[in-house]
Image (spheres, rainbow, N blue to C red):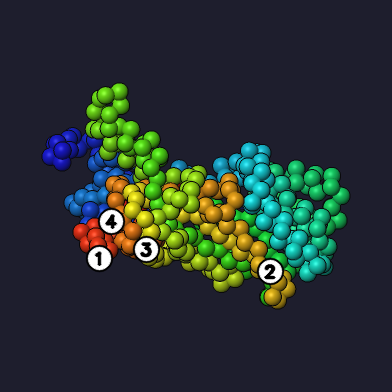
Amino acid sequence: MQTEKEDEDEASCEEYVARSDFTGSSTDQLSFSRGDRLLVHAKPSSEWWWAELQGVIGYVPASYMSQDAAGEEEEDPSIEDPWQDEEYFGNYGTLRLHLEMLSDKSRTEAYRQVILSNSASLSSKRVMDLGCGTGIISLFCAQLARPSMVYAVEASSMAEYTRQLVKQNGYDEVVTVLQGRAEEIELPEQVDVLVSEWMGNCLLFEFMVESVLLARDRWLRDGGTMWPSSAALTFVPCQADSYYAEKMAFWERPYGLDFTPLQPLAQQEFFTKPKFSHIIEPCDCLAAPCDVISLDMYTLQVGDLEEMKGQFHFCVEKSAVFHGFTAWFTVCFESLEAGGATVELNTGPNSGPTHWKQTLFMLDRPVSVCAEDSISGTIVLQRNPVWRRHMTVTLHWTIKGSTDNPDNSQAGTKSFPMWR
Ligand code: GJV
């Protein structure tokens, strides 16, 4: 295969310019600097290309490559907005996503509960609701408490309707809708409480949390309250029999024919990226879940988001086929009163369903594990340096057979782009 490629006409290579620095994490990946010109020989997947730099060949992440006209990379109009705001806020300007979020009872009731259980303390407080959407949290504040002012900030065109909803419900004295990016709007004063529903799939995807941190540093008074106050990403090794059967085992003998040559393609197509919208049953968990990343919303810094690392150690509880890992998140809302009850929104399999569901990371090959085996390793969430709402989740794991099962030891590693 390799030699055939080399025989190919030089003209089949394309020149690309690196958009930013990259350090390869294995021997078959190239390292390069922003502005380097690379010759791309092949594009075996949409994420990883086979490229050449100064005579050295290796894999490069496709998202770092830009096909600029020579020398124009500094101000190339083809470099899209790395936040993809037009598309992002365009989507939030329609009802589809708001309907999904408002129909999510666990989510919406959790925020309602936070307001309700703090209603006395919210009296005369100034609140900012960042990314208010249709304004539901701001409306709960006005309906259930007596804040002095709620600033409802929304960048999408939904803000125009939110203003109408506020008026229609008679709360326009309390709720002020500000249309614009939270990073750009001006408030007349700082606030006592910054509330936002910013969590994405696998907690961080979309990176709306960055907007929340920037608003915190600018608009939250010293000693003010963040809602949520903390967040955690939880991981568990799991079986995923039906998903595996549907996408991979299917090719073994459909209609009495051997379709297994398609399995590598199936792996590439279905298991390269995580599966959003997975629903894991508690019985699919092979061990007790473990928090791999914890965020303190008071101390977290924007720079911390570039790379977040965590560790896990699981003790397998039953013999099963280990297909992958499932992730979900929990956020906590501390009380405004010392000693007051904390409200929690848990999106895991032992809590009520939410529109986030769970996120499944499939291994390339399932592994049979037994009770008492251990699965330990690390997780790294690497924010995409170009596409700021995206990230790559890299997992390293080691399975150690128990003393009864010492042969069952192996290690693996896999990187999952979400999505770029
Ligand atoms: N400024 C203003 N509104 C925003 C911003 C921002 N920086 N970022 C997102 N929104 N939990 N993953 C708005 C967005 O338009 C949408 O209405 C809402 O916040 C997203 C909330 C749910 N998304 C999420």
Q: Give the residue drawn at x 80%, y 44%.
A: 164
Q: Please tell me the numbered disc located at residue 412.
A: 4
The answer to whether the residues at label 4 and label 3 have Cβ atoms under 8 Å apart is no
User: For the residue marked with disc 1, what is the amino acid?
Assistant: Thr
Measured in 3D between alpha carbons, the distance from the residue under mark 1 to the one under mark 2, in whole angstroms, is: 44 Å
Where on the picture, by quarter, is residue 300?
bottom right
Kind of element beneath mark 1 = loop
Q: Position of residue 34 (x, y in %)?
A: 35, 56
Residue at 32% from the left image edge and 40% from the top image edge: 268
The Cα–Cα distance between marks 1 and 4, rounded to whole angstroms, is 21 Å
Residue lying at 67% horizontally and 56% vertically, measured from the top left? 110
Does the residue at mark 1 contact the one at mark 4 (Cβ under 8 Å)?
no
Answer whether residue 344 is visible to the viewer in this image: yes
Residue at mark 1: 403
- Residue 205, image x, y percentages: 50, 53
Q: Which label is found at residue 341? A: 2
Residue labelled 2 has its Cβ within 8 Å of some atom of ligand 1: no
Labels 4, 2: front one: 2
Residue 178 seen by the camera: no
For marks 4 and 3, give the CA distance. 17 Å
> Which quadrant: the N terminus?
top left
What kind of residue is marked 3?
Answer: Cys
> What amino acid type should be assigned to the residue bearing mark 2?
Ala
Badge 4 or badge 3: first in the primary sequence = 3
SS category of the residue bearing label 2: loop
Q: Is mark 3 within 8 Å of ligand 1?
A: no
Indicate which disc residue 315 carries: 3
- Nearest to N terminus: mark 1 or mark 2: 2
Q: Position of residue 298 (x, y in %)?
A: 59, 71
The reply, left or right, for residue 348 in relation to residue 317 is: right
Query: For mark 1, does the 10 Å Cα neighbourhood hold few (<14), some (14 to 19), or many (20 or more) residues?
Result: few
